[in-house]
Amino acid sequence: MAKSGEASVKRINLALQGGGAHGAFTWGVLDRLLSDERIAIDGLSGTSAGAMNAALVVDGWARGGRDGAREALDTFWRRIGDAGRFSPLAPSPIERWFGGWSYDRAPAFAWFDAMTRFLSPYQTNPFNYNPLRRILERSIEFDCLRACTDMRLFISATNVRKGKNRIFTSEEIDIDVLLASACLPHLFHAVEIGEQSYWDGGFLGNPALYPLIYNCQSRDIVIVQINPLEILETPRSAAAILDRMNDISFNAALIAEIRAIDFVGRQLDQHRLQEGRYKHMLLHMIEAEGALREFGYASKIAADRHFLEHLRGIGERAADAWLAANFERLGAETTLPVERFLSADQRQPARVAGAPSR
């Protein structure tokens, strides 16, 4: 870990995807970034599990700086693991021995998956019990979070009736906002905030990048991606098909924003847009797509502590490798391979209506 003064501090924004228990991957990424004193955080945008990770960082930072943020993350995820210790969805030791971290074979998951396809949470969970509420109440001091001025926080949730993304800012965030951002409609009742109902923010922003562009000083946005952009083969089981549908839909808004940012950047590079009116953003991504896509759909709702620790380790290694390869490029260039997010026609030189071709 670099000490203060050994290298210039670089300020970044963090955009944290949701993905259920796979958010423990982001825990590992954040722990590694927070341990490096060359990195400062300007703002965080989060959705679902990413929203909780972002809120934990801000709250922990307000109470104890870097170490406070790392401790807040550690405490929260260990409580998640403790709560899931006796989950019926967890595989038996024999299943784990033969199947690794695949939870899709657990009999309880097959029953649970079938039930959620035919019954709504208003039927299966009439009292709207959500174990995350108690864990969040114990893990975050919302007064400290709202009072923190060292970094900006933005949480996405989907307005059910209006079909629009709602961005909650630091001053608005409470436990209901975090639960709304993580509200999967086949598992929980919509979260009521004011006169509106909210579902998971991933439908329209997983995570939203634009709040970081308009409200933060740093030009660097580091996306921590959980949902794989590509998979190796066409899914065939019902659970795998549903999981891939969710990956595609939850990545869609992010891909659209990446394309828009890339387009504006190319226009600025070609002097077709005026510097000052538009901001040249630098995009980066920390991911472990090869490792995370091996885990089945059921693993996203599995809170087994051994699995969470395994994901944390993957995240730490991914962040460590990313820092080694890209730290010097922060503030200077985009390191995200944007072409992965563009179709063939979008890879052509950027042109705007009325602009001369070269």
Image (cartoon, rainbow, N blue to C red):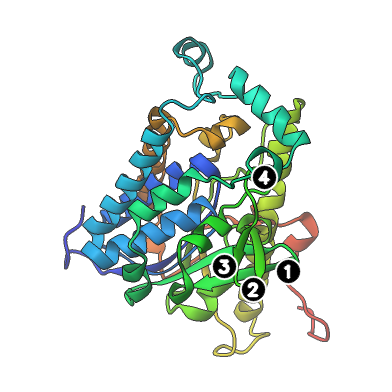
Q: CA distance from mark 1 to mark 2?
A: 8 Å
Instruction: Read off the residue under disc 4.
Output: 247
Task: Decide which of 18, 191 is in the foreground and name it.
Answer: 191
Note whether residue 281 is visible: no
Q: Are marks 4 and 2 in contact (CB under 8 Å)?
A: no
Secondary structure found at label 2 = helix
Q: Choose mark 1 or mark 4, whichever is in front.
A: 4
Residue 236 numbered mark, or none: none
Q: Residue at x 53, y 76 (%)?
A: 213
Instruction: Read off the residue under disc 2.
Output: 266
Task: Decide which of 309, 320 is in the foreground and name it.
Answer: 309
Instruction: Please tell me whether residue 296 is drawn above or below residue 324 in the rendered image.
Output: above
Secondary structure found at label 4 = helix
Q: Residue at x 75, y 37 (%)?
A: 119
Counting from the top left corner in percent of width and height, residue 194 is at 60, 72
Q: CA distance from mark 2 to mark 3?
A: 18 Å
Badge 4 crowding class, 10 Å Cα cut-off, few under 14, some 14 to 19, many 20 or more, is some
Q: What residue occupies the far front of the structure in this picture? A: 127
Residue 209 numbered mark, or none: 3
Q: Which numbered disc, 1 or 4, marks the residue that appears first in the sequence?
A: 4
Mark 1 belongs to which amino acid? Pro
Secondary structure found at label 1 = loop
Instruction: Read off the residue under disc 1.
Output: 349
Q: Are marks 1 and 2 in contact (CB under 8 Å)?
A: yes
